[in-house]
Amino acid sequence: MNKIVANAEEAIQGIQDDMTLMLGGFGLCGIPENAITALVETGVTGLTCISNNAGVDDFGLGLLLQKRQIKKMVSSYVGENAEFERQMLSGELEVDLIPQGSLAERCRAGGAGIPAFFTPAGYGTEIAEGKEVRMFNGKPHILEMALTADFAIVKAWKGDRMGNLVFKGTARNFNPVMAMAGKITIAEVEELVEPGELDPNTIHTPGIFVQRIFQGEKYEKRIEQRTVRQKEA
């Protein structure tokens, strides 16, 4: 079994206008940089993107926003992208803001085949508008629907040709749950290894969830916000 494709351009074949994509990452940590760049170059439009963040103005999903390739963002936090803010306020971009824990669970549920679940998060706010409410243990919960996507695009530290993935540190974030929820899952990795080189006990995403894998290159791994201490006199 060999799921390796040559590069990002080959990996994203089949992504068309108006599709729904899941993209792993948290801020700029663990985002599929190469695949996003390849998507920009295709000119595909009308995308619905499910991602915790919307990148920054000139990096990550911000590149797709600049080219007006995204019609809807399903996210949790979007405060670092001025172009996102402009498009949202002008009505150019449809936005569905979701509590972070609910977003993670909706992705996980989609990958696990669970169509919906009840959660107290968001009750009594705009998040709950139009949603079913039930009482559990005397506490109101709202019904949240699972999320799935035509393609899930994730970024891992290491992977093998069978699609088994290992994530590194906090770059793990949303990647494993999104890898489970795509009809087709694309994994870009920093290092490709042979089957058997990964310790089975360290594998975070089994290859059964991955259809395409490639080794990326030239990772910038930009820091979204850098805070430093002033040098003491």
Image (cartoon, helix red, strand yellow):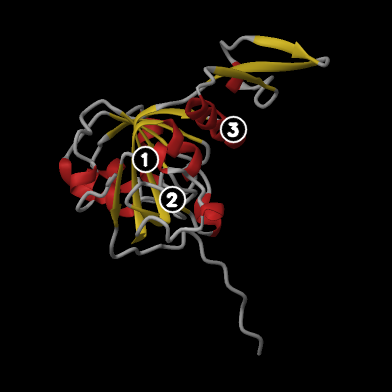
Determine whether label 2 and label 1 are within 8 Å by CB.
yes
- When the figure is inspected, residue 48 is found, relative to residue 231, above or below; the finding is above
Q: Is residue 41 left or right of residue 62?
A: left
Label located before the other in sequence (2 or 1)? 2
**Secondary structure found at label 2:** strand
In the image, what residue occupies the spot 51% across and 53% down? 200
Q: Nearer the viewer, residue 118 or 186?
A: 186
Give the residue type that dot 3 points to: Pro
Q: Earlier in the sequence, mark 3 or mark 2?
A: 3
Gap between marks 2 and 1, in whole Å?
Answer: 9 Å
The CA span between labels 3 and 1 is: 27 Å
For mark 3, what is the residue? 99
Residue 222: % across, % down: 41, 62
Q: Is residue 120 left or right of residue 116?
A: right
Residue lying furthest right = 138
Which of the two marks, 3 or 1, is nearer to us in this view?
A: 1
Label 1 environment density (alpha carbons within 10 Å; few <14, some 14–19, many ≥20): many
Q: Which mark is residue 165?
A: 2
Residue at (58% x, 22% y) in the render: 127
Residue 141 or 149: which is nearer the viewer?
149
Q: Quarter of the image for the N terminus: give it.
A: top left
Q: Which residue is mark 1?
A: 210
The amino acid beneath tag 2 is: Leu
Indicate which disc, 3 or 1, sits on the residue closer to the N terminus: 3
